[in-house]
Image (cartoon, grey):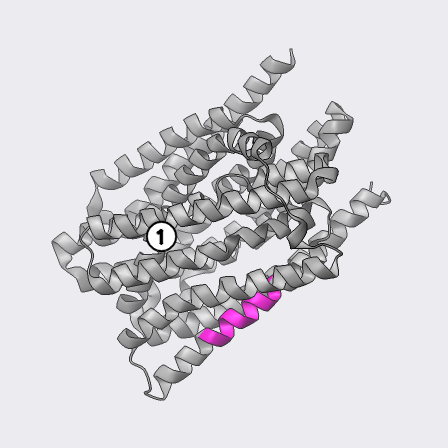
């Protein structure tokens, strides 16, 4: 199989994405350590509370069309400009709606002025996300090298801006509190640089974004296909981000705002570490998606074989990363972040267990997209999120630990319930 041209393209794509993710992991880890150390757990928690609140609405920016665009760019390459143009327009309107919802939500929750400002700046950065449709085209064409280059440029720009702010704090030009709003503006810098980098590499690949066009029929088609995935994505983002919001809101009542933000800071350090270390799974799923879509067009046997191999890879990735991380999480966090963040080590160990469910869930995503089982996925994700929130609210005294345990329980129910249901539904449809 490795001798085939498709397999060689997959391996090349994996190699470039792996290089980009390893570089991102290293740079983000180093910058994250310095940012957390200089801000401290309370102010770091304040920043991550704002990003977590914006994350509740993040799915609106993607509009649920990401995986559908990759699938259709593989199936209908002659419609590239129409798909990219329509996808970019939908993402733009989704980003505008996200900014409005996040801002109104912050005002309705009666947040303080600084927190509202953080939320407005961070959410506004997503207005530049429409150009990320270029990444979907590179994935569909198995040209991951160009996409990786654009993302490497973004990582360098983002880290440079953060180090500049850390330097300003170190030499006394900024206080940690005063630097908070500037760290929010780094998100705008990140997305501006990423959009510019995507446009440059797209042009060098022979593309021209001015040729994109948005058509009414394509808008209706993508929205008809994507609305279940939008709801599904919102449920997943809420599962992933609501903990940061709920921990702060609950602990503020019992321990005060500073203690609540400090707890969010501990949780955020562990969350960022586990998200950074999940890069092998992201690389595998993104690289294998076009091959799985093409396999479905050719042969059901080949399609099922590639899906099964993807599930196996997800499990092996968990064994390779999750188990060692569970054993060394606390000393690793203490070594890099200092004694102040020791509680985040135990949280990271709990997160390592959750890797199994997130890996299997990402593997399941390819099957849902190719079988168009979006409505069933929405139903299952909604049930999982309800269970997650109920578990967390029932015992707030556990704070971050309870949040991770509750999320793991809901992921277990959601992931395996939806996997069994989706495959059963697909077998019924085939028969």
Name the foreground residue: 289 vs 110: 110
- The residue located at (50%, 72%) in the rendering is 159
The picture places residue 200, in percent across and down from the top left corner, at 66, 63
- The residue located at (43%, 31%) in the rendering is 414
Residue 288 sits in quarter: top right
Q: Main secondary structure of the magenta part?
A: helix
Residue closest to the far right = 3
Examine the structure image and report whether residue 154 is included in the region drawn in magenta.
yes
Q: Secondary structure at mark 1?
A: helix
Name the foreground residue: 267 vs 382: 382
- The residue located at (30%, 57%) in the rendering is 49
Estimate how packed mark 1 is, as few (under 14), some (14 to 19) or many (20 or more) residues with alpha carbons within 10 Å: many
Examine the structure image and report whether residue 232 is included in the region drawn in magenta.
no
* Depicted 274 relative to depicted 236: above or below: below
The picture places residue 25, in percent across and down from the top left corner, at 55, 63
The magenta segment is 151-161
Residue position marked by numbered label 1 in the rendering:
54
* Depicted 75 relative to depicted 402: above or below: above
């Amino acid at each position: 199989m490795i001798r085939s041209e498709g397999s060689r393209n997959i391996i090349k794509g994996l190699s470039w994405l792996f290089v980009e993710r390893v570089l991102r992991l290293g740079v983000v880890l180093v910058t994250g350590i310095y940012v957390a150390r200089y801000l401290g757990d309370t102010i770091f928690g304040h920043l991550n509370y704002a990003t977590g609140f914006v994350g509740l609405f993040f799915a609106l920016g993607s509009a649920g069309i990401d995986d559908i665009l990759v699938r259709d760019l593989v199936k209908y390459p002659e419609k590239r400009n129409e798909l990219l143009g329509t996808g970019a327009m939908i993402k733009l309107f989704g980003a505008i709606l996200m900014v409005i919802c996040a801002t109104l939500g912050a005002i309705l929750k009666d947040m303080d002025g600084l927190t509202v400002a953080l939320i407005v700046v961070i959410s506004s950065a997503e207005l530049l996300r429409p150009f990320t449709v270029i990444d979907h085209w590179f994935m569909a064409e198995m040209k991951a090298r160009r996409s990786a280059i654009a993302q490497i440029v973004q990582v360098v720009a983002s880290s440079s801006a953060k180090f500049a702010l850390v330097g300003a704090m170190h030499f006394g030009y900024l206080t940690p509190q005063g630097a908070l709003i500037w760290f929010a503006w780094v998100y705008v810098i990140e997305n501006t640089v990423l959009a510019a980098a995507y446009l440059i590499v797209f042009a060098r690949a022979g593309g021209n974004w001015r040729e994109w066009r948005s058509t009414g029929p394509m808008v209706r088609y993508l929205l008809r296909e994507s609305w279940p995935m939008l709801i599904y994505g919102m449920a997943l983002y809420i599962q992933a981000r609501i903990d940061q919001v709920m921990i702060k809101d609950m602990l503020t009542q019992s321990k005060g705002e500073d203690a609540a933000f400090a707890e969010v800071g501990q949780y955020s350090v562990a969350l960022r570490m586990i998200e950074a270390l999940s890069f092998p799974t992201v690389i595998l799923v993104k690289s294998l998606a076009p091959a799985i879509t093409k396999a479905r067009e050719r042969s059901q046997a080949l399609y099922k074989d590639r899906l099964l191999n993807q599930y196996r890879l997800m499990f092996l990735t968990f064994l390779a990363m999750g188990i060692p991380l569970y054993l060394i999480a606390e000393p690793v966090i203490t070594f890099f972040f200092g004694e102040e963040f020791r509680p985040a080590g135990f949280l990271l160990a709990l997160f390592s267990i959750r890797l199994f469910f997130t890996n299997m869930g990402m593997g399941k995503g390819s099957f849902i997209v190719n079988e168009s089982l979006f409505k069933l996925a929405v139903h299952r994700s909604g049930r999982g999120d309800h269970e997650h929130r109920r578990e967390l609210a029932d015992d707030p005294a556990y704070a971050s630990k309870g949040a991770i345990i509750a999320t793991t329980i809901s992921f277990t129910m959601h992931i395996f319930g939806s996997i069994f249901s989706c495959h059963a539904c697909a077998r019924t449809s085939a028969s």
